[in-house]
Image (tube, rainbow, N blue to C red):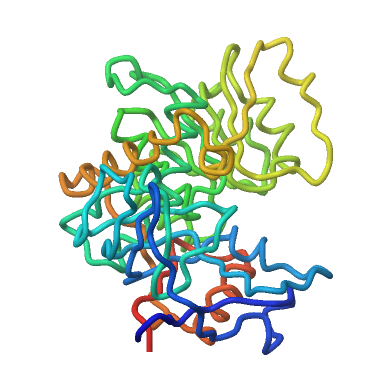
Amino acid sequence: MGNTMKAVGLYRYLPIDNEESLLDLTLPKPQAKGRDLLVRVKAISVNPVDTKIRSPKEKIEEKPKILGWDVAGVVEEVGEDCSLFQVGDEVFYAGDSTRPGGNSEFHLVDERIVGKKPNSLDFASAASLPLTSLTAYEALFEHLAISHNKSSNVGKKLLIVNGAGGVGSIATQLAKSVDLTVIATASRPETRDWVKQQGADVIINHHKDFSSQLKEEDITDVDYILCLHSTEMHWENMADVIAPLGKICSIVETEEAVDLGLLKNKSATFSWEFMFTKSSYQTENMVTQHEFLDKISQMVDNNEIHTTINHHYGTINAKNLKKAHKQLESDTTIGKIVLEGFD
């Protein structure tokens, strides 16, 4: 091994069927300094953000671009300013989109965005959780300002658009853990079955009118909406069913403008959730991601929530990662895709 490591990356941004879209590489092994941990990567998960960053564009990289923003592994080195972890700790995290990703044997990450891996999970299962659980946790409890006090949530309803995806699967569980009524959208029999398994109380079809479907369930409006697919496509439906003083949060960028005026008479709130904001801008509350991941870890070990792993694609290499990217780009993925170990 010495001072090198295996990695999967790219120089050119190409369609996933192109043989050079992802490449097996040998790179220098990094060293931990400051508040960075050097983590020996045991398992990774693949997310839509990986495919979005890899999507075709003219840019060519001089140094290889390493993707991958879900890691579970073991701390190999700690920087001189680290205080939260020590060598040998088992950790999981989603990383920082402004730095090299975790599709490599060793990976540098700021300890303030790292959590303790759940004791009850193996590395592959743990790798399925960080990005989606952080996104869901921040969306629900920071942006939508949902209370952790169960008694405050009696009778309150959350609508999750795209309940069967990675974020929707964990958001459903987190919402049920604080006694919200969860309405999830799903259209295929297999996705409807999946969201039921995650704890959804009501399921509606996102290809149909929201209001009429909710009325069939004796629901007139919802207090909160978490949009995880096609913000502009669902905008009018969401504006229609949000309650007065309700809150909508989306994680999906819009390709077309949406009419915020539709929320005015209801004094409804709209906000964005982007999990990488805190690390990208080094915000003062960046360490909350460490705290949230530790909370998620504890909830898993207490059987309050469970992993959303649904596909294991084998070892970490370019061939298997291409398969994972292609599956995600099909827009039919249920749960999370993980890969484990290096050849």
In percent of the image, x 33 and y 56: which residue is there? 92
Q: Tag count in the figure?
A: 0
Q: Nearer the viewer, residue 39 or 72?
A: 39
- Vertical position of residue 226 compared to residue 18: above or below: above
Instruction: State left or right for residue 93 relative to residue 244.
Output: left
**Image: 94 above or below 68:** above
Q: Residue furthest front?
A: 80
Is residue 81 shown to the viewer in this render? yes
**Residue displayed at 52% across by 26% down:** 143
- Place of residue 271 in the rendered image (x, y in percent of width and height, measured from the top left): 62, 28
On the rendered image, what quadrant is the C terminus found in?
A: bottom left
Query: Which quarter of the image is occupied by the N terminus?
Result: bottom left
Residue 97 image offset from top left, x and y in percent:
57, 53
Side of 337 relative to 236 (left or right): left
Q: In this view, does 276 lie above or below 23?
A: above
The residue drawn where x is 42% and y is 21% is 156
Quarter of image, res 180:
top left
Q: Position of residue 222 (x, y in %)?
A: 53, 24
- Of 47 and 181, nearer the camera is 47
